Amino acid sequence: MSSSARRPGPWLQVAALLGALGALLAVVSGTLGLGHEYVSALAAPPLAAVAIAAWLEHRRLVVPSLAALGLFGAAAAVTANGFHVVLAALALAAALVSCVQCFRGDPVAAGPWRDYVTLTKPRIMTLLLLTGGAGMFVGAQGVPDGGLFLAAMTGLALACGGASALNHLLDADIDRLMGKRTEKRPVAAGRVPPARALEFGLVLSALSFVLLASVVNTLTAALALVGNLFYVLVYTRWLKRATPQNIVIGGAAGAVPPLVGYAAATGDLGLPALWLFLIVFLWTPPHFWALALLIRENYAAARVPMLPVVRGEAETTRQIVLYSVGMVAFTIAVGLSLGALYSVAAAALGAVFLVLAWQLRRQPTRRHAGVLFHYSLLYLALLFVAAAVDPVIL
């Protein structure tokens, strides 16, 4: 079936409806003078999601979706009243045409709903939400407002889920080569069509921005979007396939959630937010290199230049020890800023981390790599729980 004959899936249909509704509300709010700029900003993400999906998968939507997005942007840029109104009206018309086109064409099987849950990588998301939630407690210096916390974590979950779905799409070729661990993932195994995974990822990302910008604040929404784009475009699309330092640089994407949480609580970024970001950034290499040692053969089969594949076992364990020492030293050093309870946890948890890293260096067995990998997950979770609890009880 050609791309021109395929009907977009329900996720893109939702985005098209939201884009058209947003464009309509922008026109109405401009006429009434009620929050026009605010409403207009919220209409842009779904319009962008439809345009990107159209360019990549649904060619018959390219003209109306790009016209809607372009005209909407032009209306925002042109302030002369007459031209502004005309451009906004044309943008609304194009958005409506694009929306109608999303409901035409031959239906395509979407895949089981459980696979869409899998696309969001729930286990990874849980840890990301924990670090984001801790960032919010640190920013609030206590228990944050319940409604704000729920909105921020929901928006962060949507951003993480959207990025993970796009990661599944871009890594499908690698997943098929990496054995039992990844070959049965939804896109790699063919249970979810690539177009549906694309639509799902784009729409979750757009909804994340709309929710965070409208209920929390614009900085929080922008940070979540930047983390999403960095993970998808910089790490997944480029670094992962290009350099053995992929996870060192790409780790910045996984370190964004604490910034999102802190910004949600405070509306800005301070030094404690930077400390939390750097903790996750320094933690990422030893964590992922321990995993890479466990599945080195899989990465080699897929030609992914992870450090154990390119530089070997001895160099990888040496780097793990070096990064572990730097990470533990840093986590203890920032204790003055993050509190006494956190400092005790950083010292105790860090001591165990160093022992396990040194054991792996001395005896680079699969067992030691597995122990360090699983402990690293517990380590980060407990460290951030300590950072969140500290301002509540002390």
Image: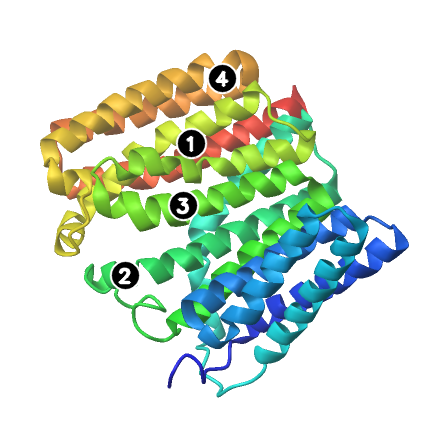
The residue labelled by disc 3 is 231
Secondary structure at numbered mark 3: helix
Which numbered disc covers residue 343?
A: 4
Viewer-nearest of discs 4 and 1 = 1
Q: CA distance from mark 1 to mark 2?
A: 25 Å
Going from N to C along the chain, the mark reached first, 2 or 3, is 2
Mark positioned earlier in the residue sequence (3 or 1): 3
Residue at 10% across / 36% down in the picture? 312
Q: Disc 3, disc 1: CB below 8 Å?
A: no
Q: Amino acid at mark 3?
A: Tyr
Q: Earlier in the sequence, mark 4 or mark 1?
A: 1
- Gap in angstroms between the C-alphas marked 4 and 1: 16 Å
Between marks 3 and 1 in the image, the one whose residue lies nearer the viewer: 3
Residues tagged 1 and 2 counted as in contact (Cβ below 8 A): no
Q: Earlier in the sequence, mark 2 or mark 4?
A: 2
| Label 2 element class | loop
Where does label 2 land, which residue? Answer: 182
Rendering colour mode:
rainbow
Mark 1 highlights which residue?
Answer: 280
Report the amino acid beneath label 4: Ser
